[in-house]
Amino acid sequence: MTLFAFGISPAAADDTIHPDLLTKEWNARWITHPDGPQREFGLFYFRKTFELTNYPPKFIVHVSGDNRYQFFFNGTRLLEGPARGDLLHWRYESFDLTRLIRPGKNVLAAVVWNYAGEAPLAQITSETGFILQGNDDDNQMVNTDASWKCLKGEALTILPVDPAKVGGYFVAGPGEQWDGARTPWGWESVGYDDSAWKPVRVMVPGDPRGIQDGSSRWFLTPSSIPAMEQRTERLARVVRSQGATVPENFLEGRAALTLPAHTRATILFDQEHLTTAYPELVTSGGRGAKVALAYAEALTGKDGSEGNRNETEGKELHGYEDRYLPEGGRRRLYRPLWWRTYRYLQAEIETADEPLTINDLRGIYTGYPFTLRARFESDDPELARIWEVGWRTARLCAHETYMDCPYYEQLQYAGDTRIQALISYSMTDDDRLVRNALELLDASRVPEGLTLSRYPAAMPQFISTFSLLWVGMVHDFWVYRGDPDYLRQFLPGIRGVLGWYEARLGASGLLGPVEWWNFVDWVPAWKAGVPPLEADGQSTVLSLQYAGALREAADLETAFGNPERAAHYREVRGRIIESVRKLYLASERKLVGDTAAQKQFSQHANVLAVLEDAIPPADQKWVMQQVLSDPALTQATFYFRYYLHRAMKKAGLGDEYVKQLQPWRDMLALGLTTWAENPEPARSDCHAWSAHPNFDLLATVAGIEPAAPGFGEVVIEPHLGPLTRVDASMPHPLGDIVVSYRREGGRLKAQVTIPKGLTGTFIWEGGKTLLHSGIQQIDLPSAVSGR
């Protein structure tokens, strides 16, 4: 079931949109219901019927709403939006209706809702409104104006989420209750009678971003991302059923479930993997019945633990829910306005004086429409499962923005997003969501210089270290994609972030007191993920993160023609490195302490010291061996192990990587189908920052990485560890890079294919072989056969 059958790709939006709409006030006006309310909870329907006698060659419309909208044409849902942004960057979507227009009457329809105080934290808002603009003179008759009609919806009640049921910080929006008796069924179709609807109240005109003296609350900018993917997804199995017998073919949608009058039933379904989907309930009859659908990532036992996610005996579902009140009509489709996250779905049904038939219960999967272009196969079958689960994790955390987690927060955090972007570069040829993230985080900056930790978000939060990681994101983009003309726009923001930190350097050369939340990793012994700090705030870990951002910014400033600023960043960085190196040389443990007092030692401080060369290169391998073997060091959790793995490779321990995947193998043993936020007990079962093995299976094991900005050259240095066979491919802007490795009789036999126009180097156990475009065979001795 595809809902977006014929749309404009927003990637080409500027070529499609009439130039005047990008610079001048729109003819269309924002519209709303005459009786409001404007900033309180409300659900509103809008319609306009029109006829065409002369068909224009193109019929393109541009659509937006606040908080959100769904747009229909002649009864078919075509768009959902707007893609999330802020009031200064309010997105609109474009759609080509040309092939859908028919003789006679046509109807444009939209439903708009305002969740008010229960809105997701990621939802920024001004007030309830809707706007639709025809693209050119031939399309102006459809513009939102006084000719549109509207109806205030009475069917929806929002259900605030009970924190006790979801078990953690939850800001992803409310549940919903829909009353079928108060629903205007068929409101979006051509034949619906809207004579009782009211004329809309016309508000301000649409103003494009950058207009002089605009009067709008929303500054409109084209969406830069494509429409979200939507496809039907069937529930996999019935775990248990009380009060009803589920027909054999019900899950396939080929048999209906009928519950007699005055029946109570509870049915627990298992999707068998986590998903993000719009659950769709189709019912007939059953006037007065009540149906509740509840959603959870995992079931919980009586002791509150989740344990093995595949085990269901003695466990219950606790999660947020939607409720539906059928009015007795035939094949009524109930669907929430926003998608849900679940592996387990539970239906609680109570019928009244009529039997209720459930014709279908299905999911419509939704997510950013990434296409997998990479491949990784080996002689370790469990790595294939790690690859699959990591890709699912990355996909479920990518929608209109990247998201830390799809169940609890749905917020785009810079620390999470940096890792997500690297996965996107490595596994797809689509960087539009990365660009969107870079731009949104840049737009979040405050006058002092820092970016917000997460954006878009209706409530400001500062994780100061995440501003540094945003700098790293820009640098990563430069390495993987280049495009200096695009990246120059971020230099003022980078300078602001680094200047904020420079003002807080102490006399010791390390950072002094740093405001806001200095999160580094969810280490249980660290309060709120903040590493140990001296009384004056000094921290080796924070200082080294700053040093890394200085190094990355110096690269960018040099590349973009600002050598003096680059030299300044390198000088500041040098002072930090010198201070940390003194601590290392003075340490009895020959490790870097978390602070100058050298009382606490962590993997984190030493990983960063290796990455930033605060530990001399000759000592880095020995230090990383201690980092991996000394349990007395504060241990990195799933998130920070991305940086641990990078430091391993840098120190010459890349062949240890496969052995370091035990935490992910443990999660597989627990039945997880996506990667958890933290080691058990985890709040979230799906956190994209834990999916970095998909990046490293390509970058470290297969060994494929950029060797020049914009991936202008490639370096291929495999680290097979215990593996004897690896086949992998990775997308490159010029085509796919394909590698095949076989370890046979003490030799490595490799076949490498790189696209036309690309050159590089193959490195194996210290030896280098130049690579050229096309296919090449490499046969080299291996000092160790099957490590």
Image: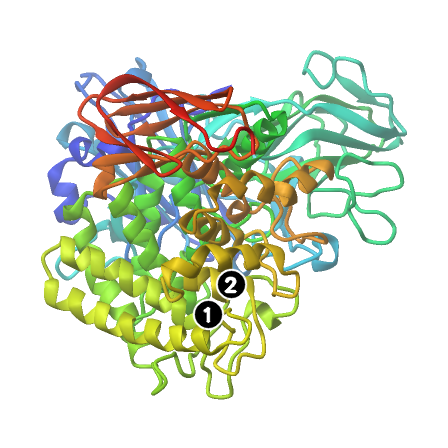
Quadrant location, the C terminus: top right
Q: Within 10 angstroms of label 2, few (less than 14), some, or many (20 or more) residues?
A: many
Label 2 SS:
helix
Percent position (x, y) of residue 731?
34, 28
Q: What type is the residue that disc 2 sits on?
A: His
Q: Earlier in the sequence, mark 2 or mark 1?
A: 1
Disc 2 to disc 1, C-alpha distance: 7 Å
Residue 759, image x and y in percent?
21, 29
Residue drawn where x is 77% and y is 42% of the image: 299
Which residue is at 29% across, 27% downward?
A: 8
Q: Nearer the viewer, residue 195 or 658?
A: 658
Disc ID at residue 541 = 1
- Eyeballing the image, is 358 above or below 546? above
Q: Nearer the viewer, residue 567 or 261?
A: 567
Find residue 198 and name its label. Answer: none
Whether residue 523 is visible here, answered yes or no, is yes
Numbered label attached to residue 604: 2
Q: Amino acid at mark 1?
A: Val
- Left/right placement of residue 334 relative to residue 307 reads left
Q: Do residues under tags 2 and 1 come within 8 Å of each other at their CB atoms? A: yes
Residue 740, by quadrant, is: top left
User: Is the residue marked by circle 1 packed among few (<14), some (14-19), or many (20+) residues within 10 Å?
Assistant: many
